Image (spheres, helix red, strand yellow):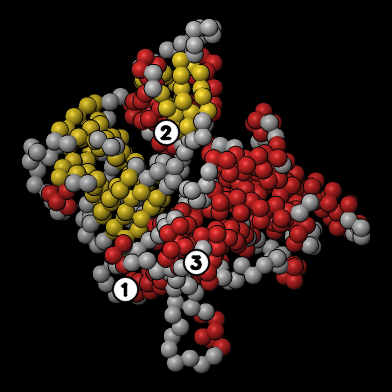
Amino acid sequence: MDSIKIEEAAAEWLACLDRPETTSDVRAAFERWRDANPRHAAAYLRLNAAWQRADRLQALRPPDAAGIDPDYFREGAPDASEQFVVSVAPPRSQWRLWSLASAAMIAFLSVGIVIVQSMRVDIFATTTGGFERVRLDDGSIVELNTDTRLRVDLSRTTRRIELLQGEATFTVAHDMQRPFVVSVDGTSVRAVGTKFNVRRRSQSIDVLVTEGKVMVGAGPAMQSVSPVMTEEIPIIAAGQSVRIATGSLKLEKISQADAERALAWHSGMLEFDAITLAEVVIEFNRYNLRQLLVTDTSLAQMRIGGQFKATNLDGFVNVLEENFGVQARHEDNQIVLLKRTASQREPAAFAR
Amino acid sequence: MSVNEQAWFNDQVLVHEPALRSYLRQYLRQPTDIEDCIQETYARVLSMTDASRAAVRNWRAFMFTTARNVGLNQLRRQRVISLDTIAELDASGVLLDEGPPTYEEVNSRQELTLLGGAISALPERCRQVFTLRKLYGLSQKQIAARLGIAENTVEQHIAKAVRLVTRSLFEPALFAPDNVQANCAEGRAGGARGTRISSGQHQD
């Protein structure tokens, strides 16, 4: 058994599949290779795990204005500088400088010199189907749902988070002096010490508060330490959710059960309470590269309840096929959901 | 093989690889034997039915046991059999009582230091291609244009880089308090390791 040969082949497949130009024929050939031997699958999954983990490097991505530097990770051979006399310090890679800067900062602080805390901007991101829990330097916890990207900017006076994409839950560490503001486009959600979820949708922003309160308003007004309280700045309290769409704001009270359902993604689950298949499909599609498609309007209106693992697409499709009179057609990167034709047996039972 | 299968494999199986490696290094002297053993162990685990997977209570212990059985088979097939080694490996059940591993919250900075170190250790062209692909999100086509090299060459660099980065990420250095590296220093398979893990840790 030549595990190295297999690993090399797996790496070649991975690099090939990474190209969007790769045809479905080649993808099918890959699947045949992978399924031919469990060792092939093992080697591929292992490499793919590292390949996906490397997406976290986006957190180090410099602002676009800084340009693209292929040598961002070049190591300046620090060992060599100790062995040979050199007149100039060797170039160190940017990412190392970045860590050194924070180490230096800690050193300063520990001898009691008050300095302005460095302005560091971090970007956290997850890929499709991903989930991440991050502890920020101020002690706040951010949970990132699938396909999410956010920028964190902690300074001495403010804590600013920009939700660039996706959905996240914030458990904010209490700090009256540093407001915690999450902004999505022009809208900001401001908290002092509380727990809330923000989801950026294509047409709206959803905010759900599970502890404490937050204020929602236009960006700039939210950034100051003591924003003027006006009627235009609504306060959302625990147990309430709000949907903000262009020019309108819809506040509604939600039950504990609804809140838990909305946050089921914290444990990788999707929970539905009799919502339409069309909505369910939108949810599943956030977590999976293979997309569900439902075109039949009466099928799209069918209501579904229950709990599913967000990434268990095949399991969900099986349930639909077995209980809901659905026939699935598997295509390249999508699964089309169709009504089962009349000749076939009617479904035994609708779940709800 | 779904996204789900990948997630399961990452969380239940791959997470134990560094510990598994340092365990196997005590008994398998040849680096290729270790690679074979790990790949075969994974293949066995992947071939299990959902029902038998569901019956596994402690994946860490299960992985170690499977790897031990695979390793014993390997040793018995070898031309020159070291009975001592077989006996040692056979008797090495003690490791299995450690209970389930504890998962820490993701320490994003540590993870970045580890990844950054792995990439710094790549050969130059590999490193540049990988950086452009993963840090800046350029496509292979765009990378080829920017570096003035053929798209096929970019693909080859990606294939090589992903193997080297994988090897770095699953190295046991962080996980092996009992320093078993000394035993197998001569047997290292490639030059991708460097000192990045320790230097990364000190700076954190």
Label for residue A305?
A: none
Label for residue A285?
A: 2
Q: Is residue A340 left or right of residue A137?
A: right
Q: Is residue A333 left or right of residue A243?
A: right
User: Of the residues shown, which amino acid type is indicated by label 2?
Assistant: Asn
Same chain under badges 2 and 1? The reply is yes
Residue of label 1? A112
Q: How dense is the environment of label 1, judged by Cα within 10 Å: few (below 14), some, or many (20 and up)? A: few
Question: Reading the chain from its start, which is encountered first: label 2 or label 1?
Answer: 1
Residue of label 3? B149
Q: Is residue A298 visible?
A: yes
User: Of the residues shown, which amino acid type is indicated by label 3?
Assistant: Ile
Task: Point out the frontmost of discs 3 and 2.
Answer: 3
Q: Position of residue B92 (x, y in %)?
A: 79, 51
The subunit carrying tag 2 is A
Could you tell me which secondary element the residue under label 3 belongs to?
A: loop
**Frontmost residue, A332 versus A91:** A332
Determine the CA span between mark 3 and mark 2: 36 Å
Residue at the image point whose x is 46% and y is 53% from the top: A55
Determine the CA span between mark 2 and mark 1: 51 Å
The image shows residue A86, relative to residue B56, as above or below, that is: below
User: Of the residues shown, which amino acid type is indicated by label 1?
Assistant: Gly
